[in-house]
Amino acid sequence: MSERFLRRAAVEQATGLKRSAIYDLMARGQFPKPIRITDGRAVGWLESEITAYQQARIAKARKSADLCPQTSQRWRRVRQTRLGSAASAPSAASRQQLKEGL
């Protein structure tokens, strides 16, 4: 199997992160480091390492949602209220629940 190098623009597109965020995460040891492709300045990231980073982020997000279902349920209600759900406006009881953090 042949590894494929991804240049920075492709890494940004794949992860949704901008250059400054990528380099900040690398400095903190939370993002894969690039590999020098030539003797010059060209670098690239291994596609497999970027994919592994994405999978780890997805697993972490899902795990935290499983650990705190009340927070994620509350967020869904707040988001539906802000974006406008199929129902016109939240009831007084729903607004009270949101204020109380239930």
Image: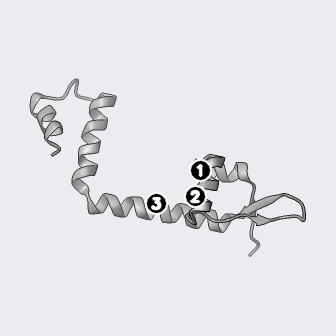
Q: Residues within 10 Å of mark 3 (few under 14, many from 20)?
A: few
User: Residue 50: x percent and y percent?
Assistant: 62, 62
Rendered-image quadrant of the N terminus: bottom right
Residue at 35 percent of width and 64 percent of height: 63
Residue 2 in the image: above or below residue 53:
below
Secondary element under disc 2, as helix, strand or loop, is helix
Q: Residues within 10 Å of mark 2 (few under 14, many from 20)?
A: few
Eyeballing the image, is 61 above or below 3? above
The numbered dot on residue 25 is: 2
User: CA–CA distance between discs 2 and 1?
Assistant: 6 Å
Amino acid at pointer 2 = Leu
Q: State the residue in front, 87 or 39.
A: 39
Label pair 2/1, CB-CB below 8 angstroms: yes
Q: Secondary structure at mark 1?
A: helix
Residue at the outermost bottom position = 1
Picture residue at 9% right of the left edge, 33% below the top: 93
Residue tagged 3: 58
Is residue 85 in view from this perspective? no
Dot in front, 1 or 3: 1
* 79 sits left or right of 11 in the view: left
Q: CA separation, marks 1 and 3? A: 18 Å
Residue visible at 64% across and 55% down? 23
Q: Which of the two discs, 1 and 3, labels the residue nearer the N terminus? A: 1
On the image, the x and y values in percent for residue 33 come to 67, 65
Is 68 displayed left or right of 29 in the figure? Answer: left
Q: Amino acid at mark 3?
A: Ile
